[in-house]
Amino acid sequence: MDWHGKRYYSFDSFLKNTFGEKIYKVSLDGGFTCPNRDGTIGTGGCIFCSEGGSGDFASDARLSIQDQITQGISLVAAKNPSSRYIAYFQAFTNTYAPVSRLRQLFTEAMEDPRIAALAIGTRPDCLPSDVLSLLKELNNQKPVFVELGLQTIHPSTAGLIRRGYPLSCFEEAVWNLSSIGVWTVVHLILGLPGETEEMMLESVRYLNSLPVHGVKFSMLHILKGTDLADMYREDPFPVFTMESYIDLILRCIGNLRKDIVIHRLTGDGPRDLLIAPLWSLRKRTVLNEIAHQLKVQDIRQGDFLLS
């Protein structure tokens, strides 16, 4: 484990350790839906989820996977030339389909010589045994990341956001993925309505007890057209200032096990949909200030955990 002189184990450091170079993600849309939208669990989705289903930055699902990869690489390569990429199935629930269809889509992506690894965003309740077998098979060909949207460990908040599965389901999925050697990346949302900072830190510390590879932190984004936006308009609740978010992120980093890779410290909200917090659009400014405060306050990942 080499952090390359940083104060936390960044995704960039992990990529350099593992692949010997920085590798960029190409976001893909496999045309999936979600059991929380099609009526299997619910019809409205999570209250914060936009029509893009977390895939607002993904390619056009009407294109073939090969064409999406080529298009995505053309956008990334202009700024960041790289010989290899991660194919990221991002929109909605990317294991929510028959295994035959999953095999076709994922194999098409992995057979592209420019693709070094596969990343799949999904729900822990959409990982039955046949899907796990496919992921194990694919992972023997090229590395596979599976991204799970936990968001919070607290049942009251999970009910409010309509997550649709219990914490035990998440735990089972993490252990199953670990048993087949797949890297699990957990999404946490900071600032969900009704949660205190200590509740958020409890969600962070909870990850330390599980065989997770990485975590993605995001502040809560309030997006147009979501049930969360209606809630915020009818009964406004507090949202982070940039200063309060950075203060919390420093505490999150200090409370995280040292070997867990931090894939993301701040989230992206589509500019045309974002209602609040608008300061989150200044992503580079936020990241620079986090780095500055880590140095000023002399904080490193895991510093706040009991030895």
Image (cartoon, rainbow, N blue to C red):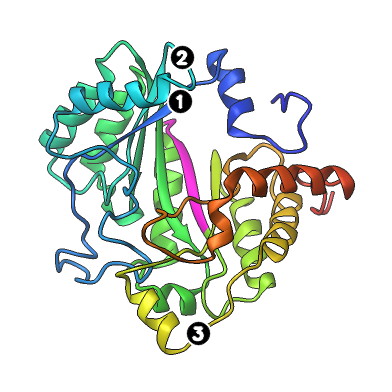
- Residue 101 rendering spot, x and y as whole percentages: 12, 36
Element type at mark 3: loop
Q: Quarter holding the N terminus? A: top right
The residue at 26%/44% (across/down) is 94
- Badge 3 local density, few (<14 within 10 Å), some, or many (20+)? few
- Say which mark, if any, is on residue 82: 2
The kind of residue tagged 1 is: Tyr
Query: Is 81 within the magenta?
Result: no
In the rendered structure, which segment of residues is drawn in magenta? 181-188
- Say which mark, if any, is on residue 239: none
Q: Contact, CB < 8 Å: mark 3 with mark 1? A: no
| Residue 137, picture quadrant | top left
Q: Is 116 situated above or below 200?
A: above
* Mark 2 or mark 3, earlier in chain: 2
Q: Residue furthest front?
A: 272
- Residue 219 rendering spot, x and y as whole percentages: 55, 60
In 3D space, how far apart are the residues under numbered discs 2 and 3 (Cα atoms)?
44 Å
The residue at 33%/76% (across/down) is 227
In 3D space, how far apart are the residues under numbered discs 3 and 1 (Cα atoms)?
37 Å
Q: State whether the magenta stretch is mostly helix, strand or loop.
A: strand
- Say which mark, if any, is on residue 24: 1
The kind of residue tagged 2 is: Ser
- Say which mark, if any, is on residue 236: 3
The residue at 49%/20% (across/down) is 80
* Mark 3 or mark 1, earlier in chain: 1
* Mark 1 or mark 2, earlier in chain: 1
The kind of residue tagged 3 is: Pro
Q: Contact, CB < 8 Å: mark 1 with mark 2? A: yes
Q: Mark 3 or mark 1, which is nearer to you?
A: 3
Q: Is 210 situated above or below 203?
A: above
